[in-house]
Amino acid sequence: MYITVIRAALKNPIVQWLVLTVLLATAGYLWWGHVAAHYRQEGIAECQRDHRDAVDAANAAQLVENERQRAAGDRVARDAAGDAATVTARIDATADNNRREVQDVYRNPPSTRPIAVGSCVHPVDDRVQSGFERAVRDANS
């Protein structure tokens, strides 16, 4: 029964036009979906390719910059090593000189005069000073 209704409907030109339009629209929609998916994938692949190229170019530029900075760093390190060697040698010489001076002082201590009570270094009252001088005279006579 449904088949006879469909056959009868398809003999009508408006229904034929409607069915043809629906079929063409469906085919166009499927074709557009396929084409759009294809070009979407192409766009993604192109974007990834551009990104990869940009990253590669940035890495190459960074390698050049790293090499330039390494060369500058090597120069600075070489100069610093030379300066450090000079300072180290100067420190070693100063330490040896200080060690010799300390040894000389302990080997030959400085001689000082005995403290004379009543001298200008340790002044005392005149009465006390005269008592010291009298005691020295008495001891020496």
Image (cartoon, rainbow, N blue to C red):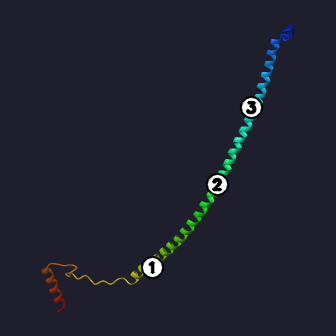
Q: Residues within 10 Å of mark 2 (few under 14, many from 20)?
A: few
Disc 1 target residue: 97
Q: Which sits in the foreground, 20 or 38?
A: 20
- Marks 3 and 2, Cα distance to the nearest angstrom? 37 Å
Q: Is residue 123 above or below residue 12?
A: below
Q: Residue at x 57, y 68 (%)?
A: 78
* Amino acid type, callout 1: Asn
Q: Quadrant of the C terminus?
A: bottom left
**Residue 7 sits in which quadrant?**
top right
Q: Residue at x 18, y 87 (%)?
A: 136
Disc 2 target residue: 61
Q: Which sits in the foreground, 59 or 11?
A: 11
Disc 3 target residue: 36
Q: Quadrant of the N terminus?
A: top right
Q: Is residue 79 above or below residue 100?
A: above
* Amino acid type, callout 3: Ala
